Image: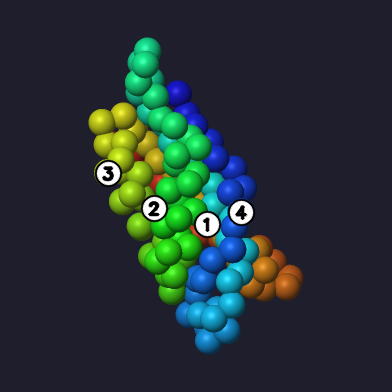
Amino acid sequence: MTIRIKQLTFEAIIGILEYERHTPQRVVVDVAMEYAYSEGVFIDYARVVQEIEELVIEKRFKLLEEAIEAIEILLTHQYSKLLKSLSIEIEKPDILEHCLVSLSKSVKF
């Protein structure tokens, strides 16, 4: 089974520019979690959404790379016995006017 969380959108302090350290901006996170489902053993996607949002808002990351690494650690620790693969993509849709920039990472277990 694969859980896909698409366009999880919230505001957070993230970035290295001076104004980014003081003004929350829109962040969009996509996650795909392939896992070994068996009867009664599953991943609560509502909990995953809440944990990702809380982590990114609380930590006030300077780099998208740091945010992705932290999300990976969080999900890997929480669901290590179930996960087969994990893909994370994060973007700041408002940072540049003429394009959309994102960063992604995929790992297999």
Q: Are marks 1 and 2 in contact (CB under 8 Å)?
A: yes
Picture coordinates of residue 97 (x, y %)? 73, 73
- Quickly name the residue at label 1: 90
Q: Is residue 93 left or right of residue 13?
A: right
Tell which circle, 1 or 4, labels the residue nearer the N-terminal end: 4
> Which one is in front in this view, the residue at disc 1 or the one at disc 2?
2
Closer to viewer: mark 1 or mark 4: 4
The quarter of the image holding the C terminus is top left
* Dot label at residue 71: 2
Q: Position of residue 88 (x, y in %)?
A: 46, 49
Task: Locate the N terminus by quadrant.
Answer: top left
For the residue marked with disc 4, what is the amino acid? Thr
Report whether 55 appears left or right of 14.
left
Distance from disc 3 to disc 2, alpha carbons, whole Å, reads 10 Å
Give the quarter of the image for residue 92: bottom right
Q: Residues within 10 Å of mark 2 (few under 14, many from 20)?
A: many
Q: Is residue 35 visible?
A: yes
- Residue at horizontal 43%, vertical 48%? 51
Using the numbered discs, state the Cα–Cα distance from disc 2 to disc 4 in whole angstroms: 15 Å
In the rendered image, the residue lying farthest to the bottom is 18
Q: Identify the residue at horizontal 42%, vertical 69% (top origin).
A: 61
Dot label at residue 77: 3
Most foreground residue, 47 or 62: 47
Q: Earlier in the sequence, mark 4 or mark 3?
A: 4
Q: Earlier in the sequence, mark 3 or mark 2?
A: 2
Q: Amino acid at mark 3?
A: His
Q: Residues within 10 Å of mark 3 (few under 14, many from 20)?
A: few
